[in-house]
Image: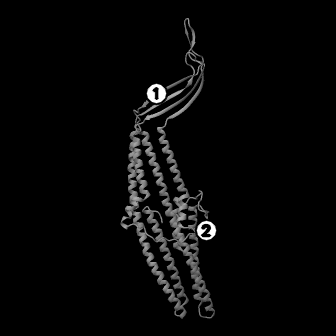
């Protein structure tokens, strides 16, 4: 069936490029049996806890933790140890009249020491670096939520599509059973001369058409199963079944407030705000990169070479303060400030673009949701009318008023109206999921 193929193809394009990477991570959800089916919540929970893109985002948080700890290391002393042996020759000697010759230093020199250097004050360089890295961690944490949000939408679309296809297949099976019963009935009537070969051929054509439609649905089912299996990390050929759960609720938010709500709760806007704050912190960090640094050093150990006993290992130490004041950095600070300001301006424009995109997305999804709701109402009416028409056709056929082909037309219309109603409900469930995601709410 063309619409099934088109729908599946579009969904595959939407999913494959950014997310459909074979999942190799540990699974928490066991592979269902042949008679088991999974709910949307089960699938969402598994996908958002084990999909590679989520685990990758979690590793980004671990990296951010390490970056924060690295920035904090500026507060800690730098301690190192050193030991060495040096053989010198020739050894210089000093001769003093009436006193003899004196060796100035020994041939064998031994030294062991511990050096420590501690920054006392760096005029906010370390503190601002820490704040910037903590800001980066906050972005990584929200990025996980953003990744999960996108995965939720992709998973929900595939789930609802599979629900629709499973039910559509059942309707086609019933339709095929009815058509085969008609074919058997008409074949018997032809033997008695009450039916024509045309009626038999027409019924066979309808059966062939319906069987082709069934094949298209079965192919689409396998496609959606492969998509969900990949998201879940199951073997790609697992005959996955899902529970029929077409949500027909609402967002619970007044229509006029949807855009405002979305701008307050969408992770894209939250991340955009955090990126702006991060860029501002980066600018502050760059501005203090040439600030002076006051530090202290202490070195202590043992070595020989002290008069009067040059070979005696003697404790020794050295301590002091140091102040480093940059004088000229070849305009690096000036140019880094320019780059930081450019980054801030770029992020402001990205935030504005995100705001516009979200507003448009919410409006479009709300329009699609309302259209789906209207289609459900119309489809319900069509189902009732088609069923009434079918009942009348059965009575008329029994009375000999209409032919077998007329009855088949009525049965086909009734079956198609049920498929259309199911499609309308599926579109509504998908539209509701899209709208909830677009305003920053979880899928119920």
Per the model, the C-alpha gap separating discs 1 and 2 is 75 Å
Q: Is residue 408 left or right of residue 329?
A: right
Report x, y in % for residue 303.
57, 23
Q: Are marks 1 and 2 in contact (CB under 8 Å)?
A: no
Residue drawn where x is 55% and y is 18% of the image:
306
Q: Earlier in the sequence, mark 1 or mark 2?
A: 2
Q: Please name which of the two marks, 1 or 2, marks the residue nearer to the observer.
A: 1
Q: Which class describes the residues within 10 Å of circle 1: few (<14), some (14-19), or many (20+)?
A: few
Q: Nearer the viewer, residue 393 or 189?
A: 393
Residue 73 seen: yes
Residue at label 1? Answer: 320
Residue drawn where x is 49% and y is 42% of the image:
70
**Residue, far left:** 256
Check the image and report above or below for 170 versus 132: below
Image quadrant in which you'd find residue 211: bottom right
Report x, y in % for residue 237.
62, 65
Image quadrant in which you'd find residue 398: bottom right
Q: Secondary structure at mark 1?
A: strand
Check the image and report above or below for 215 versus 334: below
Report x, y in % for residue 99.
56, 7
Residue at label 2? Answer: 239
Q: Nearer the viewer, residue 122 or 221?
A: 122
Q: Which class describes the residues within 10 Å of circle 2: few (<14), some (14-19), or many (20+)?
A: some
Q: Secondary structure at mark 2?
A: loop
Residue 339 seen: no
């Amino acid at each position: 069936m063309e619409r099934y193929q088109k729908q599946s193809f579009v969904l595959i394009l939407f999913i494959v490029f950014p997310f459909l990477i074979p999942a190799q991570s540990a699974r928490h959800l066991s592979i269902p049996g042949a008679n088991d089916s999974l709910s949307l919540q089960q699938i969402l929970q598994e996908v958002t806890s084990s999909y590679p893109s989520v685990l990758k985002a979690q590793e980004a948080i671990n990296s951010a933790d390490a970056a924060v700890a690295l920035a904090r290391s500026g507060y800690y002393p730098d301690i190192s140890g050193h030991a060495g042996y040096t053989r010198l020759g020739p050894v210089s000697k000093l001769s003093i009249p009436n006193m003899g010759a004196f060796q100035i230093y020994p041939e064998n020199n031994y030294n062991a020491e511990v050096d420590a250097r501690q920054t006392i004050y760096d005029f906010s360089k370390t503190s601002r670096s820490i704040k910037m890295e903590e800001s980066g961690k906050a972005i990584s944490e929200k990025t996980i939520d953003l990744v999960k949000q996108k995965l939720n939408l992709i998973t929900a679309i595939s789930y609802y599509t599979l629900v629709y296809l499973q039910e559509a297949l059942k309707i086609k099976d019933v339709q095929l059973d009815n058509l085969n019963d008609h074919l058997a009935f008409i074949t018997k009537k032809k033997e008695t001369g009450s039916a024509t070969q045309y009626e038999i051929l027409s019924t066979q054509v309808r059966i062939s058409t319906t069987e082709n439609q069934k094949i298209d649905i079965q192919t689409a089912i396998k496609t959606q199963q492969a998509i969900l299996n990949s998201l879940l990390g199951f073997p790609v050929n697992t005959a996955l079944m899902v529970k029929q759960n077409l949500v027909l609720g609402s967002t619970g938010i007044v229509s006029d407030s949807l855009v405002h709500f979305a701008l307050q709760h969408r992770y894209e806007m939250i991340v955009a705000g955090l990126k702006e704050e991060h860029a501002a912190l980066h600018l502050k960090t760059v501005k203090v990169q040439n600030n002076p640094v006051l530090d202290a050093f202490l070195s202590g150990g043992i070595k020989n070479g002290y008069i009067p006993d040059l070979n005696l290992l003697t404790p020794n130490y050295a301590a002091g303060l140091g102040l480093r004041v940059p004088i000229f950095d070849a305009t690096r600070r000036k140019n880094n400030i320019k780059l930081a300001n450019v980054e801030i301006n770029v992020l402001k424009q990205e935030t504005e673009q995100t705001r516009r995109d979200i507003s448009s997305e919410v409006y479009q999804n709300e329009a699609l949701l309302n259209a789906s709701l209207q289609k459900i109402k119309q489809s319900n009416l069509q189902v009732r009318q088609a069923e009434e028409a079918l009942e009348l056709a059965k009575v008329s056929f029994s009375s000999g008023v209409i032919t077998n082909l007329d009855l088949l037309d009525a049965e086909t219309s009734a079956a198609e109206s049920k498929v259309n109603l199911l499609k309308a409900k599926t579109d509504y469930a998908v539209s509701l999921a899209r709208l909830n995601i677009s305003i920053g709410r979880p899928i119920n």
